[in-house]
Amino acid sequence: MSIQQKKNRKTRRGARGLLTAVSLFGFVSFMLLFIRTGESRSLILAFAVPLVEYIAAHILGRFFGADILLVSLVNFLCSLGMIVLYRIDPALGMRQPVYYAAGTAGMVACIIAVRMIRRWPVFIVIMMGLSLVLLALPLAAGREINGAKAWILIGGISFQPSEIVKVFLVLCVSYMLSRRQRVLSIVYAAMCILLLALQRDMGAALLFYFTVLVLIYVSTGSLVLTLAGLAAGVAAAYIGYTRFPYIQSRVAMWQDPWQDEYGKGYQIVMGLIAMVNGGLWGTGLGSGNMTAIPEARNDYIFAIIMNEFGMVFAALVIIVYVLIVVRGAMIARRSTSAMHGHLAIGSVCMLAIQTFVIIGGVIKLIPLTGVTLPFISSGGTSMVSAMCLIGLVQGVEARNRDVLDEDEEMAEIDERGART
Amino acid sequence: MKKLRKNILRAAVFLSALLILLMVYGWIYVSKQRSRVLNASANDVIATRKESVRPGDIYDTNGILLASSDRSGARTYQEDEQRRRAVAHVLGDTRGGVKNGVDSFMAWYLYGFEFSVIDDITNLFTAGMPKGDDVHLTIDSSLCTYISTFFPKGKSGAVVVLDYKTGATLAEMSFPDFDPLTVNYSGSASERAVFINNAVQMLKAPGSTFKIITAAAALENTAGIDTWNYLCEGYMTADGKAVTCSGTNLSTGKISAHGALTLETAFSKSCNSAFAELALNMGDSKLKETAEKFGFNDHFLFSDMVVEDSVYPSRNRTPFEIAFTGAGQSALLTTPMHMCMVAAAVANNGVMMEPKLLKEAVSQKGSTRARMSPAVYRTVMTEQIAAVLKGYMRTTVQTGTGTAAAVPGHRICGKTGSAEMDGQENTDAWFVGFIDEEDFSYAVCVVIRDAGGGGTYAAPVAKKVFTYLTENCKKEK
Amino acid sequence: MQSSGFLDVLTSGLRYVFVLLAGFVAVRSFLWLRKDAKQYRKIIRRLPDAGLIGEMLCPSTGKTVPVPREGSMGRFSSCDVKLKGNGVRGIHAHFLFVPGKGLKITPHGSRQMMVNGRNVKGSVILGNGSELVLGTERYIIRFFAGLDAPRRAETEPFEEPENGEMYGPEWGEEPLPGWYGYMYGRGGMANRYPEYPGNAPAGRGTGCDDWGEAPADRDDEPADWGEDRAYDDRGRGYPYRGAAPVPGEPYVPFPEMYPPGAPYPQQRPQPVPRDDTADNWGPDDPA
């Protein structure tokens, strides 16, 4: 086998500590929940979840060329999500592993796609068309949830097309920017954002906008262009603020939620209370009494984490996201092709901005928007799209390794040739 | 590609910084807002906690026990009724009458939220309700008791005593006071008004004590202020309306003019016309700027207490209003605590310290959970201006309107104020001052509502406070 | 955070365990990142060719610059191919290696670029040995042998070649003089075998040994290339005909082709008859 493959085996062995820690975390938490509640489901999960994660990490690493570090970090976050969701509502907790499995399948598909596809233009065109169609669909035949008409119902499963379009957007914009077709990429991104704004899905619009902004800076390096884009975004936000009352109420609740403590500001106030009540080390898993916060399963799951696990643990969770960003950037810098570089940094950018927006909304750093915490929040499409983004990053890393493998093979031949 | 790599690195640094910003902001928010959020009405965590933990003891700065708890978790108080009444507003009560008293504001320590797992284990094996941490305040309850003996009966008001070097609060008293053991929770609205802590919650016009700020603004902004001369005619007109000095009554035709004045003599004689003129010359924006530097219009976020925000008016700024603001009236609103902080800033060379109440929080086993650390709120003026104002305030007590506050043998500085209030026959009597000595670094604010002139009614009260301080509260080196 | 009951004590104690585990995960991940970065740097150091597809040679100075798979070329130090010739602009062109086709070059903005004598405005795909004129400086592109690119470059649809022979000879044709052929070995590799000055390593696979045949098997050993073989002071071999450079004299690759003062040949010169006895092109029959 090639040198890289030999190295892979060594790194997989070195990863044991990390994977063990992650699995141990899952095991201990579910056992605690079992001791507290006595439900047999938690006992099953206590063994099943760590085991499945451990095996999955090894299989992915060996056969699909996944990056063990990213898989471990993602496993950590996913098991944290499963634990907290189970604690909030066991039914939710049982559904989350299913989403995790679906997400892993998506991740594998993305790894293979990035690794194998050489001719992108065909796929890019298809994805562009599909993304615009998918974004237009909720406007035509969508369901309204929480004021945003961003969901569609297919065969009993409701899903959010904007999550799927996230992946498409990153791919298309990366391709176009790497071929230096900036105007086209900006036009495409603007159309997506506009469709999202029409759907009132402000969170996703914000996400797309900032990711494209960062990608444009990465591609051009021109601060002028980036600042111009930022100014355009600020202007658009201001126009939105003055014209739409629901945005105004969100901003007012951000500035002082205490003036409407039991009304519109209730969610934010409860989030702050949860954060403060938890203190440094938390109230203990299962001991807090704050699970009744609205949307605790999606947007506000981080408030529960801060409440029951404490601020130190929450800070460590944020550090895990930072590590994902750092790893994605390392992978992007190693790539030999501009498109793959853009792809890797764009994917982690999307995840990082999503994390920032939702946690910032919960701790009242920025107004609250309706995005989910990647890997931790409940929700099938959210999990699948986050896993797909990580899959894209791992695909780039696998491709980097393939190229390095080729080079090393050549070098081996050289060496052999030179020795005689 | 090389450029691409560089840009990727920068983007990654930016994204990581964003996420780390979250951690930093969360940390800052919790440390600043914890007590307030714990006490929010939507938060029932303290109420739940009270069922399982009995509150710790509260001591004053000299170790005198002010409040304790019995086996069932109910609060018990000092036996001496006078002392009990004197500190009632600071301590607060357990049924939510007083907002943000120590009992609720420092619940984090008193109800054992800082218990570690070792404490939890120990508590598991001890009989009875575990006790929260004890809290030592900076309050000097003997001083408070003494003050309550001579504050004019039947009048409402407040007395605040601060250590201007560290910000420690020695006395925070509100009149009328109450006895937590006998107070009536279901009385009429006026009976329940006794729960209001006038020291930090009463917002009224400061009267001539605001001239400290006007003078500071003039010293900073007006050129040639050292040689400024003003001829006081007893009143001045702005915008057709008259700002009168005290003693002048235009309707009866009685004029009491101060004559030729410099800034120092105008200050010590508290000439309204002079300061109205200064305010008009400076302009509203400059005066507002200085006031905002002193803390007006700022949202106070102190760690140990909740002080109502002081207001510098921004609407309806006609020339008359501006002039009247210079003299300390118009729509200005401030608390006795804030004016005491202003005087403390003058004494402390322009550095305004944050008022502190917590000296130490100690667990039942004796380990220190928290200790007071003096914090600077702001530097509100330069040392030179502070020195000049100190001199003016000294003149006020020596020869000006504040002579009733003088204590022989000590350097007392002060400023009186008589705030006119609508609907009151008499003015509110204000006095802010300090002892300009290292051994007795204390600032005092006395407010007596509906009493009369500041120099006549508030200054003597302050004199008694100063006397007690110089006799009993010498600072250790 | 109740303070009574064994369960609550357990929960309270496990709080610290969770923080510990999370901290362990974070710290181990961070250490892993560092180790991975170090390993990667080691690999790259061992493979100086990693990510490269060839080099660009400046005939007038004899200097060469390695060419990665994609990037920009120009005078700026942030360019991937730094060229310092006369008239080379800051960012002069962008290039991208298209597997199976060649090196696609696009002039940046409105820069002037000539490929094999013709002015180009849009993208052009270059093959091995193509000549590029940026500004007033000539450069020659050389691929590594074994690179996934045909020896004859295909043209982009909008760049119609005149006789179809702009970029290289057809199969079976005589090569243009100055057709360098594929490159064997790199300075990095050859430098490690100074004891084989005449035996530059085979490079990336084997190249063509004859203009009419397919490349020989990859694992064939390179033979002794003979004394005529020219090599520069770094031990690299240039499989071209002509005299070896005299040490100390400036390096002129084809003195017979570019006598001083001669104009740049616009037409295709007569093919120079090939000397069949010279085994300069690589692997030979051991017999």
Image (cartoon, grey):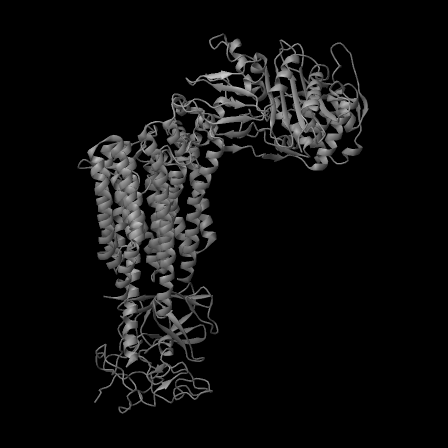
Q: Position of residue C91 (x, y in %)?
A: 44, 65
| Quarter where residue C177 is shown | bottom left
Q: Position of residue B365 (x, y in %)?
A: 47, 30
Q: Position of residue A260 (x, y in %)?
A: 42, 24
B115 relative to A195 in the view: left or right: right
Quadrant holding the N terminus of chain A: bottom left
Q: Residue at x 74, y 12 (%)?
A: B249
Q: Which sits in the foreground, B301 or B204? A: B301
Q: Residue at x 44, y 75 (%)?
A: C137
Q: Position of residue B192 (x, y in %)?
A: 51, 11
Residue C142 visible at all: yes
A286 relative to B187, above or below: below
B259 relative to C164, above or below: above
Q: How many marks?
A: 0
Residue at far top of view:
B188
Quadrant holding the C terminus of chain A: bottom left
Residue at far left of view:
A155
Q: Which sits in the foreground, B287 or B353? A: B353
Q: Which sits in the foreground, B357 or C79? A: B357
B417 relative to A291, above or below: above
B361 relative to B420, above or below: below
Q: Residue at x 36, y 47 (%)?
A: C24
Residue A389 visible at all: no
